[in-house]
Image (cartoon, rainbow, N blue to C red):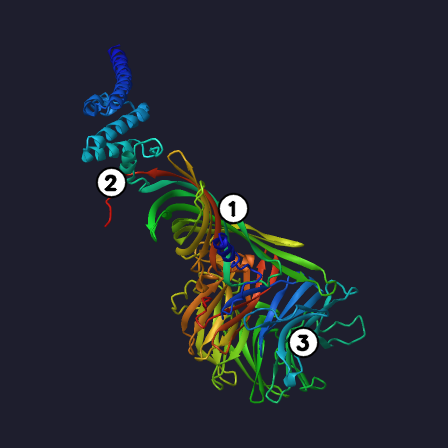
Amino acid sequence: MKRLLLIIFSASISLSAAAQCAQTLRLARATYEQGRLHEIERQLQGCLEPPEKGGFSKQEKQLRVEALKILCMSYIYLEEPQKADEAMLKLKQADPYYRPNEAVDPAEFVALYKSFREEPVYRYGVRLGVNFCRPNVSELINVVELAEDSEYKEQVAFQFGAALDLPITLFKQKNKWALHGELLYQQRRYEINQKEARINPYTNEEFINKFEGIESQTALSLPVTLEYKFLNKKFNPYIALGLSTDYLLSSKLTAERTREEEPGVPERGEDLERTKINLSGLAAVGLKLPTGPGFIVLEVRYAHGLNNMSTPETAYANQSLALDYGYADSIFKLSSLSIAGSFVFNKHNPKKLTSRK
Amino acid sequence: MKFKPLLYFLLLLSACTSMENAELTERATFIKTYSGIRGIEAAAAEITPDGFIVLGNMTIARDSVLTVVFKTDKRGNRTTPIHYYQGGSGNAIKALPNNQGYLIVGERIKTNPTAEPTDNVDIYSARMLHISNDLDSLKTWYLEDTNPNPTDPKVDYKGITLTISPDQKILILGTYQESILSPIRPYIQRYSSDLETLEWYDKFDLIDRSYRNTKSMHYVNGNIIWGSSIAAEQQNFDFSYVTIPFVQDGSTFINNSFFGQDVAEQSLRVNDIKPFFTPGLGFGIIGSRADSNGDNANIFFLSTTLNGNINPNSVRYFDVVLSSSNQTITETSSETQDYGTALTSTFDNGFVLAGHFVTTTTQVGNGLNDIVLIKIDQFGNSQWLKTIGGTGSETVSSITELEDKSILICGTNLVGGIPSIFLIRTDQNGELKN
């Protein structure tokens, strides 16, 4: 019962404080209009304290911003630049997305605003997407004689992870460049279809032996790209180039062999020997749609494998695959096309910019 | 110009290569398998100027076997279609002199429908098939029982192997059996180099026992040498010993060295004989030794002098588990069932022995029969042992050391009840790594 009373008491004090600060803001607004600038600091002092100390509540962010703006302008006109800077810093900390209205706001206030860093220092978020992988075969190693339509096919696989954006200035261009990094857990899958024709020379009848395999890999991927916003549009289109370092966690081949008019070889899973650390060159295009406290990012990215995932030494390492299924590991680099969406939050750290001479 | 980066991006995408346009490997070692219309089994592989020629058989029914031949390049890629020849099976193939193509020896089975079950129902005839370099069939002829009297017992003939003498004569080793209760004995035919004339034909019936002959024979200074197992009991090779027939060309046995004839309770089956790399050192022989009930099967090796005298100190036994640490074992030391089927001499005057072993889940192997390769030195001491195999059954028909010291193995791979032929080329250490 005592606890309930305490809660009711605290809530009523808080509500009363909020109503009081709104009232105080109206008073400060009038005081500013009347030119009694010296009184404003004292009037707003209590309301600019943290909410738990009786200041504006978290829901009254806009009122707090307005109070700080009035305070800042009063310091400007009182020629107290240091205090004006402090007020502006607090304003930007309270609302990093606050923008002055240049048509209405005093020029001095706008100028002070512009002397502070506006852009976020970095962005962080999560990424989710799908990828389609395909081996780039540099050396085809086959056990059976392959018929013409033997092929690799991409299969869809998922990827997710964390993303980090670091806006940077390059070639004196602000808001154009960003360094982007991710840590992704990636699945990769692709299908191997090998066909072998058995031809009856007497009738020219053709019987087909088929090898159907799906290689599934999991990897931790650390891609780093340099992004360039190439159009000043609202949706922030960009291109990106970069590198990815991947650590392969597992690689497994599910294999099955069918033989027309003859019994096949049942499906079986076999572990494969693969290079553990792999590098890829990256090229991407994407959009960054501003929304709320960050961006929704949509990106199409091509990763071109730079090193071989398999080696000549391991081509026949799995003899069961070779002799039972007629499959040997070709020498290949793995490339992929991914389509991913991410949401990144802006992380602001307002700061007075020092002018360079 | 705004889309220039996108264009580069698309170009990058199109740089992918698929299986169809990928460069075929130029690696030296490989595993290749070859499937026929139906299952095909390997008999032998021989070296050709630009690769290999492979001989096999496709069995439709017991009395309907087709000979199968195809050529490959040095990397095992087929350079001809698989050719099927009706009229019997093939056991051995050799290139004929003067670029005349190839001669295949084997046999044909004809069932005698009027024969009593106790009679010779399946009548075997030795079959010779001459094919061109392009693998077109040129001529087929048979060595068969021509006795027209249907009530007389029919003689079986089987063509086993052949060799070409330095003066380009073609020598064929076969067996004949006068009735189903008679011993199986060897015969030799000598043809002129153009195959037009049968110059010599002799049957060897010195002893009243059955012979099981090696898949190779050799011509040495006017003599012919091969290896045989001799059944200690009539046609029962569970009690058998080894002999090395040494026959003068156009004449009779001049030497007949024996091994194991004093041990009653063992089976010694020889399978192949090959000369040492250095001419004049003699021959190496491989086979399988087992107890008379088939237990404790081991690969055995022995060497002979140039005129076929067995060197008793050269006899070695190999078991895939016990010999893996290159230690010497006795004939009855056995962890796995091992069978020696082919051998090749190596440039260092050693041999690589090839065979198969029955895999055991607890010890070694991938399932059913796997291949075993054992490198030995000139004195029969083991240098390395390698196994190759899948979950099916792999058995070796022939093994050959190539010019670059790599090793070509030809055999049969039985998976899901369907046999196919394989060629495996390893490096000189039996590895498939480059």
Q: Is residue B69 visible?
A: yes
Residue beneath disc 1: A156
- Determine the chain carrying the residue at label 2: A
- Determine the chain carrying the residue at label 1: A
Residue beneath disc 2: A352
Front of the two marks 3 and 2: 2
Residue nearest the observer in this picture, B45 or A309: A309
Quadrant of image for the N terminus of chain A:
top left
Q: Amino acid at mark 3?
A: Asp
What is the number of the mark on residue B134? 3
What is the number of the mark on residue B416? none
- Determine the chain carrying the residue at label 3: B
Front of the two marks 1 and 2: 2
Above or below A344: residue B367:
below
Q: Amino acid at mark 2?
A: Lys
**Label 1 Cα crowd, 10 Å radius (few <14 / some 14-19 / many 20+):** some
